[in-house]
Image: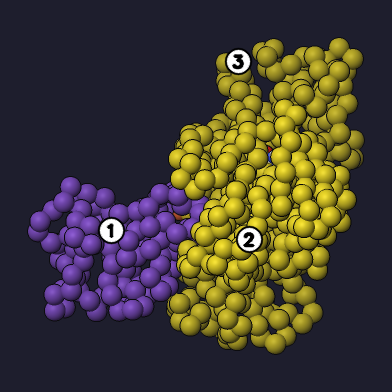
Amino acid sequence: MSSAGPVAQPDADPVTGPVMIVGGSVAGYTVASRLRQHGFTAPITLIDPEGLPYERPPLSKQLLLGETGPEDLALAGTSWFTEHEVELVHARVESLRLGPAGAEHTLTLDDGAELTAATVVLATGATPISLGIEVDDDAPSANDPSADPRVLTLRHRDDVTALRQILDAAHHTGRPARIAVVGAGVLGAELASSLTELGAEVVLFAGPGIPASALFGRRIAARLHAQHTDHGVHVFPEYAGSVRLHSSSNTKPSSDPTSTGVEVLTLSGAAVPADAVISAIGISPNTWLAEEGGLELADGIIVDADQRASHPDVFAVGDVARHEQAPRRTEHWQHAIDTATTAAAVIAEATPPSPGPEWFWSDRYGVHVEAIGSLRAAAADHPATGYTVVHREDPAHPEKLATFVLDDAGLLVGAASIDDPLAVRAARRIIQRGLVVDPDQLADPEVSYKALAR
Amino acid sequence: MSSVDPIRVGSVSEVPEGEALLVPAATTGTVPITVFHAEDGEFYALDDRCTHGAASLAEGWIEDDQIECPLHGAAFCLRTGAALTLPATVDTRTHRVEVDGEDLLLYPGTPASS
Ligand SMILES: Cc1cc2nc3c(=O)[nH]c(=O)nc-3n(C[C@H](O)[C@H](O)[C@H](O)COP(=O)(O)OP(=O)(O)OC[C@H]3O[C@@H](n4cnc5c(N)ncnc54)[C@H](O)[C@@H]3O)c2cc1C
Ligand code: FES
């Protein structure tokens, strides 16, 4: 959100060779578009086997629900690429050979083509972590269990198609599909919501306690978590350990839930049957190209504040990048945009905007939730030592709830809200401007957010 | 779509700076339109619905000459309707607003620049 507003002035054009951007999702595409906004004239190539860039957040929401079509997800069409002279290559980069600083670097594509670059941007994103799979010898997928259509993850457009097919197949048998969702973080919660709305029976493996407490703060996380049960989701307060696949597949109509073909095995030894299982237990960054290039890695490609990796001609942005000082990697839409905006400015030798605090949203069961900065100090029932946690509740709007975390100097460090997005809009400005706000005013629904952010 | 006669949608004092007034479809005769009172003191009007999704821009955050969508943060230019940031990729429509004494007059379907 720090990137609100166009990058105004074209900057003096530095003398640079071609920029090759590996990965053409929101981060890679944003690097290309910001470079052109800066008046950068060197050749730019965006390489992605998925082709035209599209947005992923609707995959678990509007696209799965059928509220939007795949064409609505496009971030840019072919005409944008022609107009801005950005070459789009539908291919996977198979290898990366980095020369010394300032020399040529070589990328090899899966069709054997070789491309050379002066600057390489890695925007390769992440891959969902799979569950361990056990297979019956006669199961249809005994040779390659990870290819079994009953074991799913959600990252790409095609994954949504696969999930819809499972729902449709069950629909033909006249009973709802029974889907096991493993992980009750942001993605798992959205999936549980969308799948129940589509009429599926959902078993959610949430683990003990209240998930996402560190992301949203305890109060908000608890209210969000209660929504699952309210909407008929079977919440299992246990972690799933692995999945067992049987030969009977979900195409076999049966009213006996134990013959649906998939069993989720929990750590305590329970076996829960389902038609399909979708794992939402986290993602791991796609770092193997960077590894081949000899770049420094630690759960992501390590980058400095300019998004520069450990080779001066290589940048990493989005989900795959990790700031050297950060305690962990950030995996959100706005972070992809902010890091891409920084990298583009640095490559174009312009001044990068100062990035805003980490911000993201999630939509489920008809509510909109957002968080900015860190809510970690509000993760437990009592605030962490040295922090003050305040909540804003409005009797006139009981659906709204906002949580604010202040440090011992009275500075806001994080905020989250349910159906109250202006709380987070205000918080961003309060944090960025370093304003000291009165906790009583934050808690008072009569005080306008705009007044607090001034 | 352009309508010749303006509609009185409210009074200036009802919409302080930084606030917005949602004019429902029943009044505009077309889609819901929001009148924004920007921090430069000017009034602007855009289609209320965000071009990215089902959000009402009347509930967004007005700053400088921009409105930030309450759902996923896309910014639109109040003067031109241009989509300035992702996830919005499609510009929105402006409508002409005039201040006549205390009255706010809206011309639904007439672009601001005409
Ligand atoms: C279902 C879902 C819902 C989400 N919802 C939200 C939300 O509500 N709010 C929010 O803030 N964030 C959300 N996110 C997170 C957000 O979408 C990601 O943070 C964002 O997509 C990261 O962008 P990226 O460009 O870094 O990586 P990705 O989007 O993962 O894209 C990486 C791209 O690189 C390509 N690639 C990988 N390897 C190679 C290679 N070797 N050669 C060429 N190309 C390669 C891939 O094909 C892919 O297109 C969601 C994500 C998902 C999956
Ligand atoms: S609905 Fe406005 S940005 Fe998504």
- Tell me where residue A315 appears, x and y as whole percent: 73, 56
Name the residue rendered at 60%, 77% in the picture. A432
- Work out whether mark 3 precedes mark 2 in sequence or the reverse, and give the earlier one: 2
Name the residue rendered at 51%, 79% in the picture. A453
Gap between marks 1 and 3 measured at Cα: 51 Å
The answer to whether marks 2 and 1 mark residues whose Cβ atoms lie closer than 8 Å is no
In the image, are marks 2 and 1 on the same chain? no
Please name the residue that numbered disc 1 is placed on. B94
Please name the residue that numbered disc 3 is placed on. A173
In the image, are marks 3 and 2 on the same chain? yes
The answer to whether marks 3 and 2 mark residues whose Cβ atoms lie closer than 8 Å is no
- Tell me which corner region of the image, top left, top right, bottom left or bottom right, holds residue A281: top right
Q: Tell me the colour chain A is drawn in.
A: yellow
Please name the residue that numbered disc 2 is placed on. A15
Check residue B1 in the rendering and tell me which mark sits there, or answer none.
Answer: none
Q: Nearer the viewer, residue A157 or B79?
A: B79
The chain shown in purple is which?
B
* Mark in the foreground, 3 or 2: 2
Gap between marks 3 and 2 measured at Cα: 64 Å
